[in-house]
Amino acid sequence: MDIDLVDPDLYATGGIPHEQFRWLREHAPVHRHPGNPDFWAVTRYDDVVHVSRHPEIFSSHRRLALFHEPTEEHLVLQRMMMLNQDPPEHTRKRAIVNRGFTPRTVGRLEEHIRGICDDLLDGLAGRDEVDFVRDISAPLPLYVICELLGAPPEDREKIFDWSNRLIAQDDPEFRTPGDDGMAAAGELYAYANELAVRRREEPRDDIVTRLLQPHDGEELSVEEFDLFVMLLSVAGNETTRNAASGGMLAFFQHPEQWRRMRDERAAGGERLSETFPDEIVRWVSPVNLFRRTAVQDTELGGRRIAEGDKVVVFYASANRDESAFADPYTFDVGRDPNPHIGFGGGGPHFCLGAHLARLELRVLFETLLERMPDISAAGEARRLRSNFINGIKEMPVRIG
Ligand code: HEM
C-alpha cells in the first residue's frame, strides 16, 4: 500500500479513497502508516469502535493536532476543550452540556429550523442557479447554532465570519488556525463571554441559560461556556454543512433515491424521513478521521501498539465495512438498521450534536423536496482540500 492516507490533495481530487480503504480492511486493518510522524491507521468497524470506547488506552488528551504537534498557544486552548479531554475531567463537562442536547430539547428547535430553511430558500427566489454550499448548506448550521445560543439574527453574519475564519477552511488539518483564525477566536470568545454574563443576569428559557445554571450542584463556569461556544461553532458547523452538501450530491448521483423520497411524500408517507438522515451521514462520513494517542502498550487487530503511538480511526472506512453493513456501497435512504459510526464509535466523545444534526438534515431535505423537487446539478462539485473533513467547497445547482 503506497498511498498517503493523509495527503489532502488525495481528498481534494478524488474524495474518500474507498478502494484503498477496502484493501486495507482486508489485508492490513491496523496498518503502520509511514510518514512524519507515522501512525496506526485503523480501518475496520470493530476496531474503530474498540478504540472509541477505551479512552483509558486511547487518549483524546493529545489528539487535536492530528499529525503534527501543535504550538504551545494552540495547545493551551485545545486542552481546555471537552473534545480533547479524557474521563473523569471530560465526564463532568459532558454531563452538563448533555442537558442542552437531549432529543426533547433539540426537538423544540424543529420549527425554528424549518423557519431558517424557508428563509434561506425565500432568499433565492428569482434565481436559476445558486451555489448549494454558499447559499444553503453553509448558513443553515451556523444559523441554527445562533438560534441555540439565543443570538439575535442581526449577529448571524458576524458569528458566521468568525467561525469561518476560525476553521481556516483551506487548512488541510483544520485545527491549526493562523493569526487571523486566532483573532477570530478571540472575538468569538469575547462575544460568548458577553452572552454568558447577560444570561446570568437575565435568565431565559433557552439552552444557554440551562448550561449556566446549577443543576445537581454543577454548572459551567463562564470560561468553560466560552470555550464550549467555540467548540460548537467548529464541531457543529463544518460537519453538518458537509453532510448536507454530500447528501445533495449523493441524491444527484442516485436520482432513484430522490424519486423514492418524493414518491413516498406524495403518497403521504414519512417513513424514509426517519432513516435518510443517518444514511446520509454513513454515506458521506463528513468527519473522515480522528486521532487518539495510546497511553499504554496494547494490542489492536493483532498488532502491538506501544505507549505514545498515534492511532487514527477512519470513520469513512468503517462506514463501508462489509462485516457491519449489507451492501455497504449502496446508498439506500431506507437502510434500517443502520449502525453507522459517522457520529463516532460510541465512546464518551460520541457526537453531542447527533440529534441536532439529524434534525437539520431531515428538515432541510424535506423542505427541498417540497419546494425545489427538481433541484439538479449545474456543474462539477469542487471538493475541499482536507483529510479531516470530507467536504465540498462549491456545488452549483439549478433551482429554477
Ligand atoms: C464530536 C461528527 C454535528 C457537536 C463529534 C465526533 C464526531 C462528530 C465523529 C467525535 C466522536 C468521537 O471522538 O468519538 C459529527 C457529524 C455531524 C456533527 C458527522 C453532522 C452530520 C454536530 C453538531 C454539533 C456537534 C450539529 C453541535 C451543535 C459536537 C461536539 C463534540 C462532537 C461538542 C465533542 C463531544 C465530546 O468531546 O464529548 N462529532 N458531528 N456535532 N460533536 Fe459532532
Image (cartoon, rainbow, N blue to C red):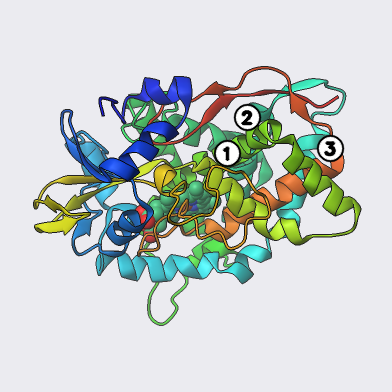
Query: Residue flagged by tag 2: what amino acid is it?
Result: Val
Residue 149 position in % (x across, y down): 56, 54
Q: Nearer the viewer, mark 2 or mark 3?
A: 3
Instruction: Indicate which disc, 3 or 1, sits on the residue closer to the N terminus.
Output: 1
Q: Residue tagged by mark 2?
A: 133
Residue marked by disc 3: 373
User: How far from the left and from the top, in percent, is residue 142?
Assistant: 58, 42
Dot 2 and dot 1 residues touching (CB under 8 Å): yes
Per the image, label 1 sits on a secondary structure element best described as helix
Distance in Å between CA atoms under marks 3 and 1:
20 Å
Mark 2 / mark 1, whichever is N-terminal:
2
Characterize the local packing of mark 1: few (<14), some (14-19) or many (20 or more) Cα atoms within 10 angstroms.
Answer: many
Q: 32 and 215: which one is in front?
A: 32
Quarter the C terminus occupies: top right
- Quick one: label 2, few (<14), some, or many (20+) residues within 10 Å? many
Of residues 398 and 255, which is closer to you in this image?
A: 255
The foreground one among 306 and 55 is 306
The secondary element bearing badge 2 is classed as helix
In the rendered image, the residue lying farthest to the bottom is 216
| Direction top: furthest residue | 379
Q: Name above or below for residue 103 compared with residue 318.
A: below
Please give the residue where the numbered disc 1 appears in the rendered image.
Answer: 241
Check disc 1 and give the amino acid type.
Answer: Arg
